[in-house]
């Protein structure tokens, strides 16, 4: 669970910076589409995943799973973390 929490905190921090939100505005069960992320935000997430966690995210993943939650995204990254 520690890996997941580290990933969750890092991803939430990036989203809060990008969208001018507070950490309290986010929750693991929140679908990503609720965050109104634009294409640049998704690219930032992909870069962050690679740089911070050695994980790969693809645009196809976001397209194939339009109801993915923040928690599911972070779990995916934690599972891939090297």
Image (spheres, rainbow, N blue to C red):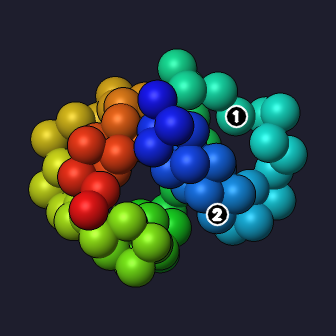
Residue located 14% across and 56% down the image: 60
Relative vertical location of residue 5 with respect to residue 12 in this rendering, above or below:
above
Where is residue 70 shown, x and y percent of the image? Answer: 48, 36
Residue located 44% across and 66% down the image: 45
- The answer to whether 13 appears left or right of 44 in the picture is right
- The answer to whether 68 appears left or right of 33 in the picture is left
* Residue 46 at least partly seen: no
Q: Which residue is mark 2?
A: 14
Q: How many marks?
A: 2
Element at label 1: loop
Q: What is the quadrant of the C terminus in the image?
A: bottom left
- The answer to whether 24 appears left or right of 52 in the picture is right
Q: Earlier in the sequence, mark 1 or mark 2?
A: 2
> In this view of the protein, which residue sits in the foreground, 38 or 31?
31
Element at label 2: helix
Badge 2: how crowded within 10 Å, few (<14), some, or many (20+)? some
Q: Which residue is mark 1?
A: 26
Relative vertical location of residue 46 with respect to residue 32 in this rendering, above or below:
below
> In this view of the protein, which residue sits in the foreground, 24 or 55?
55
Badge 1: how crowded within 10 Å, few (<14), some, or many (20+)? some
Residue located 64% across and 63% down the image: 14
Relative vertical location of residue 64 with respect to residue 60 in this rendering, above or below:
above
Quadrant for residue 16, please give it. bottom right
Relative vertical location of residue 56 with respect to residue 7 in this rendering, above or below:
below
Where is residue 23 shown, x and y percent of the image? Answer: 80, 42
Residue located 82% across and 59% down the image: 20
């Amino acid at each position: 669970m520690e890996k997941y929490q580290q990933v969750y905190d890092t991803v939430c921090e990036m989203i809060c910076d990008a969208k001018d939100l507070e950490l309290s505005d986010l929750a693991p069960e929140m679908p990503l589409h609720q965050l109104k992320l634009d294409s640049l935000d998704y690219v930032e997430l992909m870069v962050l995943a690679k740089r911070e966690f050695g994980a790969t995210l693809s645009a196809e993943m976001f397209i194939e799973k339009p109801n993915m939650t923040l928690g599911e995204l972070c779990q995916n990254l934690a599972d891939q973390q090297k």
